């Protein structure tokens, strides 16, 4: 019998919170059951298995990231939208380090997570690029480039690679975003 008030969405949310608090490596079904105050076997009334649960946690995280990014860009246009999305993406990845890391690692091995990510990561990028007049193929290139720049920066920063030089990491990030914006403007000129 299912625990009163417990449903698959509540289990996924609790799992995401536990992963953020304890870390991906420490997470287990036993730990989640303890956190929920139920027996481990009872979890399987709500989720099929660990891989399915982690895929749902990734979807939860992707939806959360998309929501935060779309809100950040409300009322923003052009270059301002690019800056807001870049800052928000980076902040989300840092504030939700464990969840973001899980999404990235699961995307590499789980087709459903990769498919979810393709849509949920792309929607904010499409919104950001709305006002730039680009051909469809170039639009795709700029979406990929944006993610490569911001995710790459976040990944390098996470590993401590930007700590060896006196230049501000914040300045370097904003420099990278400005280079992207400059490239976008050039792309817009090519498509005119």
Image (tube, grey):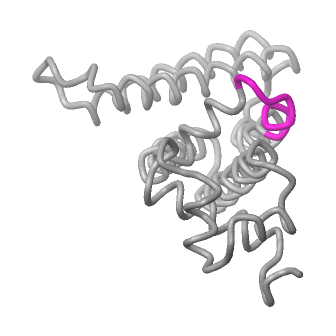
| Residue farthest along the left direction in this orientation | 166
- x and y, in percent, of residue 66 in the image: 70, 52
**Is residue 69 visible in the rendered structure shown here?**
yes
Quadrant in the rendering for residue 89: top right
- x and y, in percent, of residue 95 in the image: 43, 53
Q: Considering depth in this image, is 76 or 165 the residue closer to the camera?
A: 165
Quadrant in the rendering for residue 124: top right
Q: Is residue 51 above or below residue 177?
A: below
- Which residue is painted at 73% across and 35% down in the image? 129
- Which residue is painted at 63% across and 68% down in the image? 33
**Is residue 87 visible in the rendered structure shown here?**
no
- Which residue is painted at 60% across and 26% down in the image? 146
| Residue farthest along the top direction in this orientation | 190
What main secondary structure does the magenta stretch of the protein show? helix
Give the quadrant of the N terminus: bottom right
Q: Considering depth in this image, is 35 or 125 the residue closer to the camera?
A: 35
In the image, is residue 115 part of the stretch drawn in magenta? yes
Q: Is residue 50 above or below residue 167?
A: below
Q: Is residue 24 left or right of residue 127?
A: left
Q: Considering depth in this image, is 62 or 19 the residue closer to the camera?
A: 19
- x and y, in percent, of residue 76 in the image: 62, 54
| Residue farthest along the bottom direction in this orientation | 4
In the image, is residue 14 part of the stretch drawn in magenta? no
Q: Is residue 121 left or right of residue 23?
A: right
Q: Is residue 64 above or below residue 83?
A: below
Q: Is residue 36 above or below residue 157?
A: below
Q: Is residue 88 left or right of residue 145?
A: left
Q: Considering depth in this image, is 39 or 171 the residue closer to the camera?
A: 39
- Which residue is painted at 80% across and 16% down in the image? 192
Stretch of the chain drawn in magenta: 108-116
């Amino acid at each position: 019998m299912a625990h009163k008030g417990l449903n698959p969405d509540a289990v996924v949310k609790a799992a995401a919170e536990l992963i953020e608090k304890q870390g991906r490596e420490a997470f287990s079904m036993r730990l989640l059951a303890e956190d929920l105050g139920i027996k481990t076997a009872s979890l399987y009334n709500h989720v099929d298995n660990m891989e399915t649960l982690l895929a749902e946690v990734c979807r939860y995280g992707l939806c959360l990231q998309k929501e935060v990014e779309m809100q950040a860009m409300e009322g923003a246009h052009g270059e301002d939208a690019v800056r807001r999305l870049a800052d928000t993406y980076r902040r989300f990845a840092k504030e939700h380090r464990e969840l973001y890391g899980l999404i990235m690692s699961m995307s590499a091995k789980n087709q459903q997570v990769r498919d979810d990510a393709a849509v949920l990561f792309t929607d904010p990028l499409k919104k950001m690029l709305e006002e730039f007049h680009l051909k469809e193929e170039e639009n795709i290139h700029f979406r990929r480039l944006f993610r490569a720049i911001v995710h790459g920066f976040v990944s390098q920063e996470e590993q401590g690679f930007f700590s060896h030089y006196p230049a501000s990491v914040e300045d370097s990030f904003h420099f990278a975003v400005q280079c992207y914006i400059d490239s976008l403007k050039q792309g817009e000129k090519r498509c005119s």
